[in-house]
Image (cartoon, helix red, strand yellow):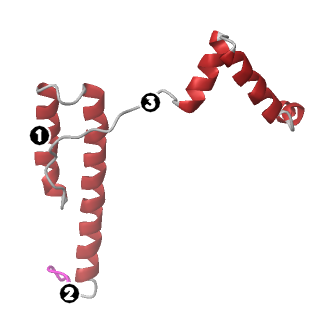
């Protein structure tokens, strides 16, 4: 907070100074400016054929497609781990939703085994 207080009102002047130094050939200032204009990408869009995920059971085919894509060099192993995590989360959410749906459908129904004597 102290740094923010010191710099308050100076952001424009500092930015203009950095730009001016970059235009004069200062490598560090140029890098700072370019990193703000075009920051390095942390990841990239991934495009490959993933089977449709409509229910948890579809996760098996989706996982197989991800493994195949890594084997064929279409995806990196780290991209595959990220996609596998998304597939797993989808399957978990779908399974939980299905369990909830079944519990609601069975609410109020007589249990299969009755212990009434």
Instruction: Give the residue number, with chain letter if any, for mark 1.
Output: 64
Determine if the magenta segment contains residue 52: no
**Residue 55 horizontal/vertical position (percent):** 18, 61
Q: What element carries label 1?
A: helix
Q: How crowded is mark 3: few (under 14 residues within 10 Å), some or many (20 or more)?
A: few
The residue segment tinted magenta is 111-116
The answer for how far apart the CA atoms under marks 3 and 2 are is 57 Å
What's the residue at 30%, 59% (across, down)?
93
In the rendered view, would you say 52 is above or below 109? above
What's the residue at 67%, 18% (across, down)?
23
**Left or right of 13 in this view: 117:** left
**Left or right of 11 in this view: 41:** left
Asked if marks 1 and 3 touch (Cβ < 8 Å), the reply is no
Q: Residues within 10 Å of mark 2 (few under 14, many from 20)?
A: few
**Left or right of 85 in this view: 111:** left
The answer for how far apart the CA atoms under marks 1 and 3 are is 28 Å
Q: Residue 41 carries which label?
A: 3
Q: In which quarter of the image is residue 117?
A: bottom left
Between disc 2 and disc 1, whose residue precedes? 1
Q: What element carries label 2?
A: loop
Between disc 1 and disc 3, whose residue precedes? 3
Q: Residues within 10 Å of mark 1 (few under 14, many from 20)?
A: some
Q: Which of 35 and 100 is in front in this view?
A: 35
**Residue 8 horizontal/vertical position (percent):** 86, 37
Q: In which quarter of the image is residue 82?
A: top left
Determine if the magenta segment contains residue 113: yes
Instruction: Give the residue number, with chain letter if any, for mark 2.
Output: 110
Of labels 3 and 2, the one closer to you: 3
């Amino acid at each position: 907070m102290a740094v923010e207080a010191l710099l308050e009102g100076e952001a424009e002047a500092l930015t203009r100074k950095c730009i001016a130094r970059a235009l004069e050939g200062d490598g560090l200032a140029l890098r700072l400016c370019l990193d703000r204009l075009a920051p390095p990408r942390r990841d990239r869009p991934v495009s490959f054929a993933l089977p449709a995920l409509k229910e948890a059971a579809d996760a098996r085919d989706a996982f197989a497609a991800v493994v195949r894509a890594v084997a064929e060099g279409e995806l990196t192993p780290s991209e595959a781990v990220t996609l596998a995590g998304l597939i797993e989360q989808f399957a978990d959410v779908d399974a939980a939703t299905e369990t909830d749906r079944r519990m609601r459908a069975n609410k109020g129904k007589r249990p299969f085994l009755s212990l009434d004597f």
